[in-house]
Image (spheres, grey):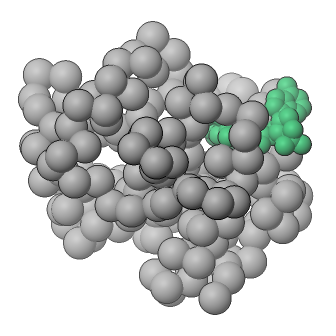
């Protein structure tokens, strides 16, 4: 897809990143994982640096990369690649977390983001990505399958049926 760029978050992204975070405030998804409303964007960037370096602030946090998806000057989504951490947690939540802002959905952005993330995963040392997806999340299942995801199992996460897919990392 022309025009979609994935890159690390920067201080200058504060306004759009906080706007996006606020859009997700009332739903089950988050735009800035681990963001503390009582804090500010630069603190969140500091947290991300820690997690990126594998310095967990609490048990279960994983070494991870957080990337912002931009189309032109608009922040359209966020994707996380979790490289390692608590094996039980990784087994449940998988290596990938991603969201696209509501008014940017249905344009192939998540598909492009996940494709790119399979390359980031390879660079970070993963051979195969495990990606979890709620059974009723048809949009995410479509994206995962389009990126080469093969259904490997079904499981319950917090009482909710989930699918587990495997996607080969790409170079
Ligand atoms: C899942 C999500 C990331 C998809 O983002 P997106 O940018 O809209 O995804 P894409 O445009 O790349 O592809 C979505 C595909 O699913 C399809 N789709 C959307 N809703 C669907 C539905 N209810 N049933 C079947 N297919 C559906 C779309 O039509 C599209 O396929 P198409 O290109 O053939 O039309 C986005 O909906 C989102 O952020 N959801 C909330 C967070 C979330 O669920 N994250 C994933 C956790 S596993």
Quadrant showing the C terminus: bottom right
Residue 79 location (% of width, % of height): 50, 52
Can you say whether 15 is above or below 38 in the image? below
Vertical position of residue 168 compared to residue 117: above or below: below
Q: Residue at x 20, y 62 (%)?
A: 49
| Residue 107 rendering spot, x and y as whole percentages | 72, 40
Res 15 → quadrant: top left
Q: From this viewpoint, is residue 114 visible?
A: no
- The N terminus lies in quadrant: bottom right
Task: Give ligand 1's quarter of the image.
Answer: top right
Residue shown at the point (59%, 23%) measured from the top left: 103
Is residue 3 at least partly visible in the picture?
A: yes
Depth check: 38 or 163 in front? 38
Residue under the point 46% across and 81% down = 124
Q: Position of residue 165 (x, y in %)?
A: 79, 58
Image position of 79 (left or right of 2): left
Residue drawn where x is 33% and y is 24% of the image: 19
119 displayed left or right of 46: right
Quarter location, residue 148? bottom right
Establish if 19 lies above or below 12.
above
| Residue placed most toward the observer, 162 or 74 | 74
């Amino acid at each position: 897809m022309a025009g979609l760029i994935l890159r690390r978050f920067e201080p200058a992204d504060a306004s759009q990143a906080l706007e996006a975070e606020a859009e997700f405030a009332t739903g089950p998804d988050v735009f800035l994982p681990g963001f503390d409303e009582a804090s500010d964007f630069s603190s969140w960037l500091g947290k991300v640096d820690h997690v990126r370096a594998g310095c967990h602030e609490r048990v279960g946090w994983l070494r991870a990369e957080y990337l912002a998806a931009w189309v032109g000057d608009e922040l359209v989504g966020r994707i996380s690649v979790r490289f390692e951490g608590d094996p039980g947690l990784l087994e449940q939540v998988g290596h990938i977390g991603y969201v696209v802002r509501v008014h940017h959905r249905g344009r192939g952005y998540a598909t492009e983001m996940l494709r790119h993330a399979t390359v980031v995963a390879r660079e970070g040392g993963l051979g195969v990505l495990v990606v979890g997806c709620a059974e009723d999340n048809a949009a995410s299942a479509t994206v995962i399958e389009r990126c080469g995801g093969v259904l490997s199992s079904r499981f319950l996460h917090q009482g909710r049926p989930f699918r587990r897919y495997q996607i080969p990392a790409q170079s």
